[in-house]
Every structure is written in C-alpha cells, then in structure tokens.
Image: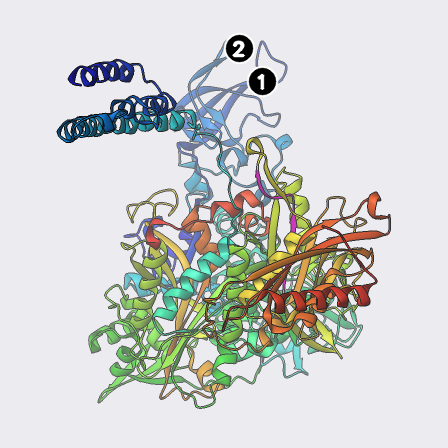
Amino acid sequence: MKLSRNFLNDYIDTSNYSDYELAEAMTMIGNEYESIEKLSSATKIVVGYVKEIKDHPDSDHLHVCQVEIAPGEVTQIVCGAPNVDKGQKVLVSLPGAVLPGGEIKKSVIRGQESNGMICSLTELGVDPKYTGETREMGIYVLDKDAPIGEDGLKYLGYDDTTIDFELTANRGDLLSVLGMAYEIGAITGTKVKLPETKVKKEVDDIKDYVSVNVKTDKCPLYLARCVKNLKIGESPNWLKARLMASGVRSINNVVDISNYVMLEYGQPLHFFDHRTLGNKIIVRQAENDEKIVTLDGQERTLSEQDIVIANEDGPVCLAGVMGGLNSEVEEDTTEVIIESAIFNSSNIRRTANKILRSEASSRFEKGIDPKRTYMAIDRACYLLEKYAGGTVVKGLQKYDTIDYKENIIEITLDDVNSLLGIKFTNDDVLDTFKKLSFDVKVEKNKFIVNVPSHRLDIHIKEDLIEEIGRIEGIDKLPSTLPVTANTPGHYEDKYYFNKLVRDRLTSLGLYQVKCYTLTDINSLNRFTNDPKDYITIASPMSEDRKYLRTGLLPSLINVVNYNTARKNNDIMIFEDSDIYYLENGVTTQKSLVSGILCGTLISNDWHKDKIVIDFYTVKGIIENLFEYLGFTNRYHFDVVDLPKDFHPYQSARITIDRDVVGYVGVVHPSISKNRLYAFELDLDKLFNVKVRGIKNKEISKYPTIVKDFAFIFDSDVVSSDVCEAIKKACGHILDKVEIFDYYVGENIGSDKKSIAFKLTFMDPTRTLNDEEVMQLFNKAIDSIKNKFNATLRDK
Amino acid sequence: MKEKQEKIRSEFNKDLESVKTTADLNDLRVKYLGKKGLITELTKNMQELSIDERKEVGRISNDLKSELTEEMTKLENSLKEQELNAKLVSEKIDISMPSTKVSVGGVHPLTKICDELEELFISMGYDVVSGPEVEIDKYNFEMLNLPKDHPARDAQDSFYITDEELLRTQTSAVQVRSMLKNQEKKPFKIVCPGKTYRRDADDATHSHQFMQMEGLVVGENITLSDLKGTLEEMARKMFGRDREVRFRPSFFPFTEPSYEVDVSCMKCGGKGCNICKGTGWIEVLGSGMVHPNVLNGCGFDSNKFTGFAFGIGIERIAMLKYGINDIRDFYTNDLRFLKNYNRIEGGDK
C-alpha cells in the first residue's frame, strides 16, 4: 500500500513525525514499510512565465527565453525544448536547484547566458508511467492561471512523500488512507477527521434511473446512485498528484474520482455509463462459458463461480475484478451509475486468480466494512458534483442483507498478562482501546470491547491481546523458558539412524550434498529395473522442475559434472534424502542414501603415493558402513538382476539377510564419460534390520597358525564362493581367510585366474597343534579341487 | 716387568689416539686384550716364576687390563654416539614438503546448522521429529487456520500435485501432525527440521526449495515471554553470546499474536551497519502464540493449553552466520564451497 502523506494529512495530523519516524513507528506496530520516496526530489522549482523567446543565434534548436521567475523579476534561460513558447507558464529550476539529473548552475550556452532550466515532469523525477510524458514532448506547460514565482512542486501537489507499506494479509482495512489514519492515530493519539460527503443539490429520483436486482447470495450488499450532467476533463493537479503518489495513473476527472474514493475508503467503486448500462442492474453468478470483454479489451470466458453485473443483454462487468468494455466511461459520457458493493471474498479471489488481479479484487478478497460501502458512494457523488460538474440524483438503490451485529469481545487483564507473560495494568489496556478508537466498558474485572466494523480481523480475545501488545509495546517483555515436565529430548528413531549413516559416510571421506527434489522427465526411473509411478506437479515453473525425483543418482551426476567442469576432479559425495512416488495410486515415501565417487582417494605425487578410486574402494566404504551399523557377516554382494544404467560387469547387488538393500557399481559409460562409481542404498530397509547389542569378545591368549595356498581357477569362479567353501571345510577353528594375491596372465592360460589365500587358525580355548591344522588345511584343498575344478599351485 | 708394563701403556696411549671408528677400536681391543694380545703376552711365561712373582705379574696385568678396558669402553661409547649422530644427520628430511592426507568428508552447511540447532533444542528437552514433504492441504493450510481461498495463502505460492496434495510450503504442517498424534493430549516440545517448497523463481535470495525448522511448545501457562527466552537461547547459540532479540508484531494465521523476530546485528552489535541496513536489527524468523483455532482443531482445549510456535529459515541462518550472498550456492554443491564448512568454530569448543 503506497501511502501519500498529503493524502493522509487530510484525515489526521501527523506533523510531529518525519517520514522516517512515521514509517519506523508503523513497522514497530506490525506494518512493515518497504520504502520512503518523495514524489519529486527536485528543489528550487518555481512557476515561471515565458515573456520573450528568440532563436539562439548559434544554434538551430536552442531558444533564448526571458522568463519571469517572480513577480517583476525576469531572467534569461536557454531552452532546447521544441515546444517552448512565448506566453507559457512553465516550471523553472533556478541556479542551485538539485534535480535527479544533477545540480543546476548559472552557465553560458554557446555564448548566451542561462540562469536555470525550464523542466519537464520527468526531469523533476516523476515516473513517466504516471504522466505519459515522452522525451519528444519537451517541457511541461502549466495552466495559464499558475501564479508566477510560486513553488512549482507545491503548485502541482508534488511536494509529497510516499511510504510504501508491505501489509499483512489480515489487515484489509489498511488498504485505505482512512484505515491508515486510524492505525496511525493509535501511534500519535490524534483523532481522525472523516471526509466530506454532503452534496449541495440533489434532483429527481433514483428509481427513475436504475433498478437493482441481486440474484446471488455471493453479493450481500449492493448500492447504486446516479450522477448526471458530467463534464469529462482533466483532474485538478492535487488529485492527479495524490493518485500518482498512491501508484495510480490519472485518466480523467470521473475515472480518477472512482479510484480516489477507493484509495480513501478501501471500497472499490464502479462507474457505468448510463447510456450503455440501461436501467436495470442484475447481479448474478455467471453461466458456464459465458463471455465478457473486459476494459482491457480481452475476451474472458467465465464459469458459474464468477459473479457478474449484467443488464438484460448480458454481462457488463466482472464483479469485483474489472469492468466490461461495453459499459465503460467514455470521453462523451455525461451520466454514470455508481456501484458500491460487497462481493463474496472467496469468489472474487478465485476469479481474480483465474483471470486478473486488480486493485479492486485485492480489496474485496480481504473483506470490506459495509459502513464504508455507504460512505464511499456518497463521497463519490460529492466529488463528482464538485470536480466534474455533475448533478446528483436523489436517493439510493440498495440491496442489503448484512447482519449489522456489534462485534463485542470480553477480556480480562489476566487474559492479557497470562498469555504474554508481562505485567500490563488496567490503564495500559484502556489506553490501547482509546488510541484505537475502540469503545470499551469496564465491568468488574472485565473489559467489554465493542470492535469497530472496519476491524474485520478481530474476532477473539487473542486478537485483542495482540492489539494491546502491539500498541503498548512489549519492550519490557521478560525472557523466561517454558516450565514443563523436565523430560529429556529425543531424536525420532529413523531421523537419528539417518544421522548415524550420514556421520559414518562423512568419516569415510564423503561430502554430503543437497539437491533439488523437483527434476525433469529424463532423470526419472534411472538406475533401476523397477520403474516407479512418478509424481507430477500440476502447475510447474518449468519442464526442468516438473517431477518429483524417483532416485538420487541423476542429481548426484549433475553435481559431479558441475564440479569436474571446474576442475574439482576428486569427488566423493553422497546425498541422503526422501523420494516420493505412487504405489497403487497412493503417495509413498522412501528414504535413500546414494553416493558417487571418482578420482583419487589418497594421493601425494612427489611421494609416489596414490590410491585411485575403483569398485573395491566403494565396496569397502559400504562394508565399513555396514560393519558400523552392526551388519557384519549378514551382507552379501552378488551380480543378480543388476539395474540398467550400471556397468553390467562391474556392478553388484547388495543384500542383507537375502533382502535386496541396494546396488553398487560403475555408472554405465553411455551416461557418463567419466568413470564414476555409484551406490544407492535403501535407508528404510537398513533402518529396519534388527541388530543385537555389542558383547565383549575375549581376545585369544593362544597363538595362531597361518597357512597359505594358491589355486588356478577358471576365470568365472567367484572368489567369495571359494572363501565360503574354505570356511565350511575348516569349521570354527578357522579364524579368518584372506586373499593376498590375484593373477591373470598368459602363463596360466587366457581363461584362467590364480588366487592365493591366507588361512589363519585359532582356538580361543587352547593351543592348536600342527597336525590338526594340517588336516583341516588339506580338507580345504580337497574341497576346492572338487568344487571348482581348480589346480593347486606349487610353492 | 714394570718396564714391559710401561711400554704397553705408552704404546696403548699412542694407539688410542689414532682410533677413529668402532672398527679401529675393535682392532685395538684384539691387539691388547685378544688371545694373542699384548696383555696375554705379559703373562706368557708365568710358570717359570715364583709364587710371589706370579702374584705380582697377575696383579699388574689385571690392573692394566681393566685400565685399558675402561678407557676403550669410554671411547667406544663416545664413538657410537658420534656415529649415531652422523647417521641421524644423514637421515634429515625436508618437513616442508606436502603431506599425505587421508580424505575426510563433511556434512552440508545446512545440515551443520540443523545439527547445531537440534543439539540446543534437545538439551532443552525438545523432541526432534519429521514429517512428509508431500503433504495434504488440510495439514499444510486448513488446520493451520488457513482455509481455502484465504488471502494469506498468497504469501506461499505452492506446488500442488492434486487439489488436495502439495509439496509442503512450511514445516508448520508437522505441528498439526504432532498434535493429532499426541493421543493423550499431554504437553510437549518439538522441533521439526525439513525441506519445504514454494513456487518462487530461483535467484540470489529466493529458492523454490529451502529448509525450515519448526518449533512448537504446547502446555499449560506457556507465555510469550517463554518464546522470547527460548529464541534468545537460539540467537545466542547461533550468533554469539551478546545477541538480543526483539519482537515486531506481524501476522501468521496460525499464531495470535504473531511476531517477526529480530536479532541484534551480529556484525555491528546494534550500532547500525550495512548488514542490518542501519537499524541494528536483523529479521531472522516468524513466531507467535499458537492460535486457539489450531489448538482446538487438533484436540487441545485452548482454555487449558497455550503454546508457542516459531519457524526458522535454515538457509537464512546460514547466510547470516557465514556471510553467504547467494542462496543457490547451497544447492550447487561446489566442493570448494562444501569443504569450507568442514570445521568447528570458536563457539563449538
């Protein structure tokens, strides 16, 4: 809401407050301001009279003017504007004036002395969107009767400041200068003066001009009056300036008055040309697919949720949003029917969202005080009589179903203090209501408050408590902590589990990233053989952000690409996030943790240290995580049902207790040219794995016996199967089996591989003897020979 | 005899002077103390002597032996030390050469902020809970006193999926879930961190996806001053011990009264600077006393219970705390950006 201070000053005296003080004070009672701007920042502007004009002897476009800048005082000014002429009243900026474009100084222009500048409105700093001024139009010419020597800004009403407030959605009443005056009155303690509405003369009877027939319950109040004999013309300067300062462009005196009254009362008005409207106003809901051409020339297709004002031929106005082109006020209009009404805010909001948001709709949406509906229509008549030569027709057509019940709320001092935790007194409470002009009666301990009708936001006790806190201020509010049962705080279990996973992954060297949930169609259902029924945003902002991602890896690949493009080549990242999709049509949530790694894990070039990330690095990270989570001996990697987008021969499926929990592997080269190692784990499943508590494991006092052997296998033999076979053959005395060498090469045959195993035997209860160990060792050898068709290698 | 002894003695002194290494010393040891050494020579023809003479020779040669041994051991120790020192010198490295670093990871700065806040609130007895990002209109708006067509919905342009489902615009939706889930309607304290979404075009200060942490306390005799004290704790934890907070009246449909909360400027301490635009205060979050409609709608009798709620913008806190100017940096995930936040701060100790 752009508030003009000149406009405000008509209703309340705020002369003790600077613009900044007023804006700050309003902010502290809940009405934040965005900016403070002068309508024109120019100084030393006077009304001048062009007495003489001659062409400049050394220029083809400059003029040398003799300008009277104060009664009897003439000075020479060189002016380049094409439209400057003898006999004009003009705006002169005198030497020393500061304009937005710079300071004006006495100068000599091509040999001719120039003591100032004749200005356009734009040069004064006024936005051309309000004045319609263009560069070619030259200087601004004032009315003939402008008094020579007077302050030019004052004469035009440009000596004004606009404070732009960002209002909260509940304060529809502040979308009016009058509402602002009441609010500011609560700061200054000064009284509000109401505008003049009494017309001088009324003729005829409204009944002979128009009838009102309301056929919908979405219009609880509809008033109509008529003004005739209007003379359309320019508005007076002050009116134009006020509109400008309020962010509204001047059109003509009649249209300007309708806007002015809306700004004054917050009640949008509509003026119909009586000729085109006819004598019957019908207020009804639109029919589906009914059409109307609005003031902006656009054809709008309506539905039955929209409210229209119609005559017998069809709609003439989209109620509360915009007038119809067919009944608008034109240059030759002489008679208008004024509408002042209230429409259902939900309907207006829906129509406005669908078709067009306007100054009017934003006010209807937030609600209107019906008392102002009456005041505004009379005020419009008064202004049309005074500034547009109109004759007001006597009487008012009205349809009024409003229940004018008083809004009475009872409250006690204890209510106030026990919610705020502060010690206000009875006088503080009374002071607030007085400042806000709320009627209040005191009965015993109770305040009985009669809330004025313009405060549509106040319904309950707490609303009044807010007013008291707001107006009296809560600077002295003490700081305390809530006194509640002294119970320890907890993390939600799954949230905490997620945190543990995150902490372990970071300790393993990975960085957590955060990516957008919304994604494009190509990123859906990647890295899976189980495509999800994905979720689509109904009104997306772009194709790139239209769907809810079904996995995390595509986002991570984007992060990798971003980083490698910036030479961040060693990348170890993960994201833990929920994904959403439909399962049997129902929105389903799933938690994933995914990672991508590439580049080197450890490197120190001069020292010749280098570990390059590969499949086994990532596998190790997952094993480390799983061991931390207590899954030791329960997880397994295999190559069954590998999802697309992974390398088909360098990837693995991961299971825990035979349940698939994720995948790890090389990203398919068709997706990334860089060699990327990826994993994706189902966090929900990991969370649900039941894990026993930690039990102490005695460290054996007895020595271990270590044996090793190497075999040549067919190349498709899987090492983990061999390890399993060894464990099975040796039983519990085998403490561990490790692979310490691996070889493929020509001297063992092209489809063969050699793997060397180290077996560690140990019994925590006794010393083993060599014989029994050898027995088991040989058993393992036989088992491998039989199961894998393998050859034992000589030492 | 004496002469022989003197001769050995003086020869030994001469030899000792020319010893340069432990190897030389070994040669010396062999020469004097070896099986065929000079001292053994001394006692060679002992059987030809009388008992007294033998005694005398034995004593003299023994004394000489221990004398020489002692001096050689002394020299040996000093030689060993010299040799060790020489070895150490030869092992000198250039410690300024680059180190070998094991890679360490870290959490995202937004997680870091959440962790710090969670730690604080848990220490004050709050539970940390979460809720779904795909939320129903009823929890995200309606039960928070924001019926359909309420103008306040304008401030939160939403990503709707269907007429009833949307990406939550605020973690406040978890308020409703928590209150409904609380079957016994007992007092409680929660914070709910999470992702939220609004239909804003991304630029330096707007992001269609961002994080919030909602706080909610419901109990008997909960007051606005409790909210103030709580938020002061928060502000001091995040922005330093000297921070003050102030409340500015505002409007949120689900709280009444509602306040914007300002924290005294962390840069200038309240004197006024470019960060606080000269006001000395920085807006950090919205809060208020839970609206009776919300309490009653969730089964908490507003005649018995009151409560406060606040919503912290995690990005905003991070941007203020670290001086980050572009909100998009959080979602670009440049590793150089992420790595910058992988350490503790003075206040963490």
Q: Front-most of A58 and B100? A: B100
Q: What secondary structure is found at the residue carrying circle 1? A: loop
**Residue pointed to by mark 2:** A110
Q: Quadrant of the N terminus of chain B?
A: top left
Its colouring scheme is rainbow
Quarter of the image for residue A680 reads bottom right
Q: Residue at x 23, y 25 (%)?
A: B48
Residue A474: within the magenta? no
Q: Bin the neighbour count of mark 2 within 10 Å (Cα to Cα): few under 14, some 14-19, many 20 and up.
A: few
Vertical placement of B102 versus A512: above or below? Answer: above
Question: Residue type at mark 2?
Answer: Arg
* Quarter location, residue A538: bottom right
Looking at the image, do the residues carrying marks 1 and 2 touch, with CB atoms under 8 Å apart? yes
From this view, report whether residue A717 is shown above or below residue B225: above
Q: Chain of mark 1?
A: A
Give the residue number, with chain letter if any, for mark 1.
A62
Residue A164 visible somewhere in the drawing: no
Is residue A582 among the parts visible in the rendering?
yes
Residue A109 location (% of width, % of height):
51, 13
Which SS class for mark 2? loop
Chain under numbered label 2: A
Q: Nearer the viewer, mark 1 or mark 2?
A: 2
> In this view of the protein, which residue sits in the foreground, A743 or B285?
A743
Q: Amino acid at mark 1?
A: Leu
Magenta residue span: A593-603
| Frontmost residue, A213 versus B204 | B204
Q: Is residue A480 left or right of residue B253?
A: left
